[in-house]
Image (cartoon, rainbow, N blue to C red):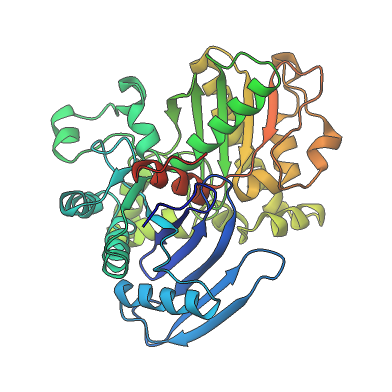
């Protein structure tokens, strides 16, 4: 049977969580989304699943059913697709791309999944127990359903395996670091790669020489990370061994004195699990002001809520510190880009992060910054030496493109 044309080829993208499985069917070249959905409450007494198709005549449906594991979740996905008129056995599906959070130092590129690769992903679960084990479950379920289609792992950490040793290495006893595989792995790498490549393409189209482009990418969502990228290669990133390090986030502290951990154990008589919960789930913006949604936070600040105002100040202060430190690490800045939910939609955060930096060649166009759009765009003033951009991230399309390339069908 002949292979489908490039504009007809599709990739099924799978993002497995411990109790959920998100999916999207994408044409990698154009980014067209044919269907997307989620299976939730996997392993609980009653699961929920929904799907929505794209296009002007989009269809949607949802079900409640028992979903004991990820293998059954994929069977539910197949039924959902069938109900909206799409067959997962369609020969236009040329690959399945799996988002895998932790690839360690072993995987620097998207990789065709075989038994050995699956075992390695499971072994790396020690570094990301909330993510990798779920990814393995999703891989098992998808391979059982689609055994004759190439399955490709796309690692969140892959982009950052190329970090220079100086930024990847903690000043920890080297034998201990080696034994327990402790280094800066980063996260959101698929997004940082996609956004930085998009920025290079946008500026090249405007006649800019991008061969040595110095970029700062700010992925600001409920989880948040920053990266410094020069000539397409990462020089630094804010997340480390785990996604806790770095910027202030929705429920995570970001950078914090490590001795706080010991202090809480000793003085509060808290267990490691309790401290971990405080730092990862009860802190950040939620811990500072009781809110993690920036729409609520901005409304509270406008209403005169002092706790919300302080939380926003803390958030912006940390953000500006990273921008400043990366500017020196890069030897200057050519572009600063905001992406993800907060980065794409919170004009106040963008303005506060860059205000007063005219002396450093950063001038925001206030009118452009206020515009809400799903398009990649410049928001810097014409006289700004540094290009400031908003680029909506599209991790699913990036995963689809990389999976198609590994499967031998380059997206074009």
Report the side of 186 relative to 377 (left or right).
left
In this view, the residue in front, 19 or 243, is: 19
- What is the x, y in percent for residue 19? 38, 71
Q: Find the residue positioned furthest to the right.
A: 367
- Return the x and y of residue 238 as percentages of the image width and height: 45, 35
State the quadrant of the N terminus: bottom left
Relative to 122, 11 lies left or right: right
| Residue 115 seen in this snapshot | yes
Q: Residue at x 64, y 21 (%)?
A: 204
In this orientation, does residue 270 appear?
Answer: no
Left or right: residue 11 versus residue 154 is: right
Q: Position of residue 172 (x, y in %)?
A: 24, 30
Q: Is residue 52 above or below residue 208?
A: below
| Picture quadrant of residue 147 | bottom left
Q: Quadrant of residue 162?
A: top left
Q: Does 61 sit above or below residue 166?
A: below
The residue depicted at 36 percent of the width and 24 percent of the height is: 167
């Amino acid at each position: 049977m002949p292979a489908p044309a490039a504009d007809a080829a599709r990739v099924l993208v799978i993002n497995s969580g411990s109790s959920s499985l998100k999916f999207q069917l994408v044409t990698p070249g154009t980014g067209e989304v044919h269907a997307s959905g989620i299976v939730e409450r996997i392993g609980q007494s009653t699961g929920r699943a929904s799907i929505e198709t794209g296009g002007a005549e989009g269809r949607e449906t949802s079900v409640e059913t028992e979903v004991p594991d990820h293998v059954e979740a994929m069977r539910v996905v197949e039924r959902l697709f069938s109900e909206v008129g799409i067959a997962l056995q369609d020969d236009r599906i040329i690959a399945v791309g799996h988002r895998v959070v932790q690839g360690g130092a072993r995987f620097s590129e998207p990789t065709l999944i075989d038994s050995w690769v699956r075992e390695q992903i499971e072994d790396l679960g020690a570094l990301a127990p909330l993510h990798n084990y779920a990814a393995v479950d999703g891989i098992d379920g998808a391979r059982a359903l689609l055994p004759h289609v190439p399955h490709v792992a796309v690692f969140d950490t892959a982009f950052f395996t190329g970090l220079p040793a100086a930024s990847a290495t903690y000043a920890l006893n080297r034998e201990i670091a080696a034994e327990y595989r402790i280094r800066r792995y980063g996260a959101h790498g698929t997004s940082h790669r996609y956004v930085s490549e998009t920025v290079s393409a946008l500026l090249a189209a405007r006649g800019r020489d991008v061969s040595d482009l110095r970029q700062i990418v700010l992925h600001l969502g409920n989880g948040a990370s920053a990266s410094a990228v020069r000539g397409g290669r990462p020089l630094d990133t804010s997340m480390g061994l785990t996604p806790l390090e770095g910027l202030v986030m929705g429920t995570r502290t970001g950078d914090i004195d490590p001795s706080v951990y010991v202090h809480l154990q000793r003085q509060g008589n808290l267990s490691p699990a309790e401290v971990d919960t405080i730092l990862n789930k009860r802190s950040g913006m939620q811990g500072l002001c009781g809110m993690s949604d920036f729409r609520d936070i901005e409304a509270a600040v406008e209403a005169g809520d002092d706790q919300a105002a302080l939380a926003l100040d803390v958030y912006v202060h940390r953000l500006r510190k990273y921008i400043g430190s990366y500017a020196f690490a890069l030897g200057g800045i050519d572009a600063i880009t905001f992406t993800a939910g907060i980065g794409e939609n919170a004009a106040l955060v963008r303005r506060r992060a860059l205000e007063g930096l005219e002396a450093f060649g950063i001038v925001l166009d206030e009118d452009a910054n206020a515009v809400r759009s799903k398009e990649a765009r410049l928001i810097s003033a014409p006289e700004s030496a540094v290009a400031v951009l908003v680029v909506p991230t599209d991790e699913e399309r990036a995963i689809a493109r990389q999976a198609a390339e590994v499967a031998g069908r380059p997206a074009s």
